[in-house]
Amino acid sequence: MTTRFIDPYWRMLKEACKPLRVLGDDVRLHLDDADKQAFKERFTSLYFEAQQKMLYKDHTLDRHKVSAIAIISVIEQEIVDARKLGPNIALERVALDTGLSFMLVWLNDELKERELPTLRQYSMPEPFYCDTPYISSFARSLYYTRINGKSFTTTSSGGLRVAL
């Protein structure tokens, strides 16, 4: 079941990483076949773990859960390694941008099937307490989760959370 998500997501991930190539040796992109296989194994593991906690265990997970699982899998596999640049959120931004874009494509496919207008981009809430864009704050939260050695786990409802 999860195989249908891997190839389209991997293509989007490679596309999202293209702008990082201008940084040369300062950024290592892990996008070869072995990296894809490791991503697929982690994605599949999280997918089935989440699915087992759902009320109807034989149902496909929704686009939100699939995108969250893909984001976590990219981060845990460290598809983007930009440590030479110092502390940064490049990995988390690529993971978030790709995951949210994947969810948007999936949503637009469903909207087209129903002959409804599609969306051009995803939107994030406006921050209340600072000028930092919400997506950057979200990426920073994921970054600090990663560097503090936290991992992600599924909830009793099949959602995902940081394991404390």
Image (cartoon, rainbow, N blue to C red):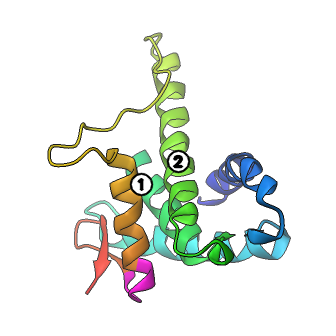
In this rendering, is residue 8 above or below 108?
below
The stretch drawn in magenta includes residue 25? no
Q: Residue at x 26, y 73 (%)?
A: 155
* Residue 39 in sight from this viewpoint: yes
The stretch drawn in magenta includes residue 149? yes
In the rendered view, does 99 fall on the left or right side of 20? left
- Label 2 crowding class (10 Å Cα cut-off): few <14, some 14-19, many 20+? some
Between 57 and 47, the one lying in front of the other is 47
Q: Residue at x 77, y 59 (%)?
A: 23
In the rendered structure, which segment of residues is drawn in magenta? Answer: 146-151
* Residue 58 in sight from this viewpoint: no
The amino acid beneath tag 2 is Asp
Tag 1 residue: 61
In this rendering, is residue 158 above or below 77?
above
Sequence-earlier tag: 1 or 2: 1
In the rendered view, does 12 fall on the left or right side of 125? right
Tag 2 residue: 97
From the image, which quarter does the C terminus lie in?
Answer: bottom left
Quadrant assignment, res 105: top right
Distance of mark 1 from mark 2, alpha carbons? 20 Å
Q: Residue at x 82, y 70 (%)?
A: 25
